[in-house]
């Protein structure tokens, strides 16, 4: 029988549903076996950017040793199991987050400048202006072959109008991604809506029927594509059947957690919730799981993820903290508040570690999903009490298809623009740019 590879864009389809497939051995042409190619045996290269607000307690972030033989300090300790996949960078700065004559408003400037390298115009009105963000530059080139050029995610809703930070529009504090200098991309914070966006497709009537059956009859999206899945399994080898089963199990598990975050069936039944989880850790992990599924199915190759808005006053009662995050960050040397900030920082990293470990567990050719991705985690503020914008907390997880040497802590010259790192990531992933924001030269990552 003549071998016919599966198209990379194969979907399992049903009424109002379309489930894209992960990379499979059966998608590889025999003639190219063992050869790496974009979207082929090794999988595509991807970029993701995570932003943590209100700075970091830097003494608990920065490793004391440089090079490969270093210990992870307390904030980073949750990443111990994936330390071989980490590049911790010290010395980077975001000069355009500083006042530079514009006075207070460091929080707004920080998010607006983090991925743009451009100082935002100080305004509370409609005349907002920053720059095109790195993720959107990447999406222009990496997103052409995927269903979504980019995904913008977060775990705290926020306005894109009105005043939020001492003369700056809320658009600056609440947006990480900018499609143009005057157009922030906004973000999706509801895991249910994101799930439906990733796995729903069809006419308005089909989508409405799908939503009705899933809401009222508690059906899974996988129930709609079951016939397609059965037909597909007959064409696959043993390894691919196992991979498909694991992938679909992952979708079902995420959907179950979205549908019923409180646990199993309760008296009187339950309905698909319309809101977001109350539990912060569950919320971050759900959104992270959906990002991983989107990468795995090649629905997108570029993603931004805001842990919370800059200047966030979220109260982490699950950590027995009663004051807001931003208030605690202005600790004025209070040892109890400093300890609280360090706990919040570590709490965020615990959720990030969960996402990174999941990416590292998914095989994709001779590498893993994480091995084909570069995931940046950091902030444009170092010490939240001082609003420092130098010696920032920045790390990269993943090797971007073998282009990044990880398992090390490196210190770059003080005041090196953060955009030098982002320029290097763009170039390493095939984006033809020579500068971005206030970059001066590409950082060496190999």
Image (tube, rainbow, N blue to C red):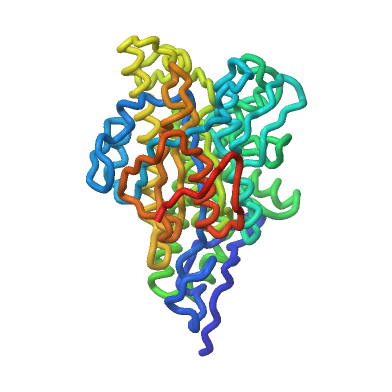
Q: Position of residue 79 (x, y in %)?
A: 31, 41
Q: Position of residue 143 (x, y in %)?
A: 62, 55
Q: Position of residue 174 (x, y in %)?
A: 60, 28
Quadrant where the C terminus sits is bottom left
Nearer the observer, 389 or 197: 389
| Residue at horizontal 39 percent and vertical 63 percent from the top | 367
Q: Is residue 270 left or right of residue 323?
A: right
| Residue at horizontal 37 percent and vertical 20 percent from the top | 341
Is residue 215 visible to us here?
A: no
Residue 243, picture quadrant:
bottom left
| Residue at horizontal 24 percent and vertical 42 percent from the top | 70
Whether 227 is drawn above or below 67: the answer is below
Nearer the observer, 60 or 205: 60
Q: Is residue 130 left or right of residue 223?
A: right
| Residue at horizontal 39 percent and vertical 70 percent from the top | 239
Whether 300 is drawn above or below 238: the answer is above
Residue furthest to the bottom: 1
Q: Is residue 421 left or right of residue 104?
A: left
Is residue 41 visible to us here?
A: yes
Q: Position of residue 273 (x, y in %)?
A: 56, 33
Whether 196 is drawn above or below 117: the answer is below
Nearer the observer, 6 or 207: 6
Give the tally of numbered discs.
Answer: 0
Nearer the observer, 35 or 294: 35
Residue 14, picture quadrant:
bottom right
């Amino acid at each position: 029988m003549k071998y016919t590879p599966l198209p990379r864009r194969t979907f399992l389809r049903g009424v109002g549903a379309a489930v894209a497939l992960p990379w499979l051995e059966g998608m590889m042409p025999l003639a190219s076996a063992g050869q790496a190619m974009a979207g082929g045996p090794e999988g595509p290269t991807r970029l993701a950017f995570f932003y943590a607000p209100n700075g970091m307690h830097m003494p608990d972030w920065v490793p004391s040793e440089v090079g490969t033989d270093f210990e992870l300090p307390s904030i980073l300790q949750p990443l111990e199991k994936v330390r071989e996949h980490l590049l911790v960078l010290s010395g980077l700065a975001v000069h355009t987050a500083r006042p530079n004559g514009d006075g207070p408003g460091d929080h707004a400037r920080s998010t607006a400048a983090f991925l743009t390298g451009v100082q935002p115009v100080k305004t509370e009105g409609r005349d907002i202006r920053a720059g095109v963000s790195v993720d959107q530059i990447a999406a222009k080139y990496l997103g052409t072959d995927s269903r979504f050029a980019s995904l913008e995610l977060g775990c705290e809703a926020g306005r894109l109008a009105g005043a939020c930070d001492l003369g700056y529009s809320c658009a600056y504090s609440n947006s990480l991604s900018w499609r143009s200098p005057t157009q922030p991309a906004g973000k999706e914070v509801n895991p249910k809506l994101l799930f439906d966006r990733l796995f729903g497709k069809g006419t308005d009537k089909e989508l409405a029927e799908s939503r009705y059956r899933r809401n009222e009859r508690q059906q899974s999206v996988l129930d709609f594509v079951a016939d397609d899945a059965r037909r597909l399994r007959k064409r696959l080898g043993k390894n691919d059947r196992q991979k498909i089963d694991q992938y679909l199990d992952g979708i079902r598990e995420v959907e179950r957690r979205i549908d019923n975050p409180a646990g199993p069936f309760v008296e009187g039944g339950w309905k698909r919730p319309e809101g977001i989880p109350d539990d912060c850790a569950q919320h971050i992990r759900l959104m992270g799981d959906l990002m991983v599924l989107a990468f795995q199915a090649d629905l997108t190759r570029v993603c931004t993820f805001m842990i919370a808005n800059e200047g966030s006053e979220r109260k982490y009662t699950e950590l027995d903290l009663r004051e807001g995050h931003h208030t605690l960050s202005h600790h004025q040397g209070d040892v109890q508040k400093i300890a609280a900030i360090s706990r919040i920082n570590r709490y965020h990293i615990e959720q990030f570690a969960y996402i990174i470990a999941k990416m590292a567990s998914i095989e994709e050719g001779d590498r893993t999903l994480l091995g084909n991705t570069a995931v940046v985690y950091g902030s444009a503020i170092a010490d939240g009490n001082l609003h420092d914008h130098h010696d920032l907390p920045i790390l990269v997880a993943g090797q971007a298809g073998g282009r990044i040497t990880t398992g090390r802590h490196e210190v770059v010259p003080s005041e090196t623009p953060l955009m030098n790192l982002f320029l290097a990531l763009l170039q390493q992933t095939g984006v033809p740019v020579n500068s971005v924001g206030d970059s001066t030269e590409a950082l060496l990552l190999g």
